[in-house]
Image (cartoon, rainbow, N blue to C red):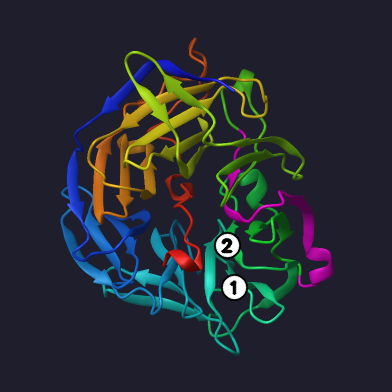
Amino acid sequence: MTLLESATLTEQTVPLRPSSLPCDAYVLAIAAFGSHYAASASAPSHKIYLFDRTSLQMSQPFEGHPGGTTSLRGIDSVAGVNQRVIVSSGKDGVVRVWDDRTGSAAIEMPFEGEQRALLSCDVSSDGLTVAAGTELQQDDALIVYWDPRHPAAPLRKHTSTHSDDITTVRFPRSSERSRNNLLLSGSTDGLVCISNADEADEDEAVLHVGNLGSSISQTGWIPSHGAARRTRAGGVWAATDMETFSLWSDELDLNNDLDIRSPSVHTQARTWVTDYLIGCHASEEGGLSVLVGSNEGDVALLRNADFYDRTSSWSLERLWTGHHEGVVRSALLVERANVLLTGGEDAKFLAWSCAPLPNEESDMAVDGDLGPSVLAKRDHDEDVEMGNLSPNNV
């Protein structure tokens, strides 16, 4: 397995704007909405802090979740209202939709019955279905569904999809999948599953299952992407607590599985060694970008001309170095603004310049166009995964 420096590799050593949490806490997750970025904090705070997009000045925070915020998402529509909002889940067993005008929750969706921690959540592209995954309690780990227009009680609970903590649930954003209201889920039981979120009969709900054999920490959809004459099929990506990274088809046939720490660069000019996966960014124009980190606090963006080809070389496209101290827990790539946001265990919240990547018709071993030509088109900055928010991390 080979990692090559891209001919257009750039390294940023000074952030555009620095900021930080007002407390000694980790930045666990980042999302964008309206004129703000949101960052969830670990103990002892557990709050969700808001930062102005232009200045990174902090404003009034959301209270978050007692015991810990476990996931944070930027959503374009919920409960029939087409307005980008922040949705979060927590150890208090509640999914909350936040209103930045009041600084409080506009919608609360509680787990019905005995309180159980929710480890992940997401909202369907039409905004009419909310899903959350629970921790294992006694013998059950559940996927819980709500209609956010009637949030007082869940629509249904699926108890047999997974047999351990459900660490990630993801609805697709691309139109061809969202019509079917599919839900991608991953668990510490090692399974990746695709379910029909509209199916009330649990025995009929699970459509596809893949088994990695290791605890799943993150998953995401890969939309079909590329220029019209070189369209690449979409699929699914998944990551484990052991830093293995895998690519799957839409029906969860395993196409590629590797240790994300394996690709490295050792030249006279630089050395790059990956220590962990931060997350991935999916775009209908550019496909998949992989954000990885080092234990020293540096961040790199990796791409591959063909993720499904085990022999295909990886490309080191972007580096951001020198300002975080220790592990970077979260990242958000905002293509339309050419900005990368990072948050770490050092409580720092940084905005970096991210030069547009070359398009797939160039001679570089990269795939996709993240440049100015896509500014008028939709990207999926809400689909950047935010790192492992497992119970031990919050």
Where is residue 256? Give x, y as percent: 68, 34
* Residue 27 sits in quarter: bottom left
Q: Quadrant of residue 136?
A: bottom right
Image point 41% across, 24% down: which residue?
317
Q: Point out the image quarter for the C terminus.
A: bottom left
Against 253, residue 211 (above or below) is below
Image: 99 above or below 58: below
Quick check: can you spot residue 80?
no
Left or right placement of residue 263 versus residue 19 in this view: right
- Is 339 drawn above or below residue 197 in the view shown? above
Q: What residue is at 52 percent from the left and 16 percent from the top?
A: 365
Residue 298: numbered disc: none
Q: Residue at x 46, y 20 (%)?
A: 359
Which is more N-terminal, label 1 or label 2?
1
Q: Amino acid at mark 1?
A: Glu
Q: How crowded is the residue under tag 2: few (<14 C-alpha within 10 Å), some, or many (20+)?
A: many
Whole-percent x, y for residue 333 in the image: 38, 41
User: Separation of disc 2 and disc 1 at Cα?
Assistant: 8 Å
The residue singled out by tag 2 in the image is 167
Q: Could you tell me residue 50's position as x and y percent?
A: 25, 61
The answer to if 369 sits in the magenta stretch is no
Mark 2 residue type: Thr
Q: Which residues are magenta?
A: 200-224
Query: Is 59 left or right of 64, judged from the image as shown?
Result: left
Residue highlighted by disc 1: 135
Q: Nearer the viewer, residue 228 or 217?
A: 217
* 382 horizontally vs 258: left or right: left
Categorize mark 1 by other alpha carbons within 10 Å: few (<14), some (14-19), many (20+). many
Instruction: Give SS at disc 2.
Output: strand
Tally of numbered tags: 2
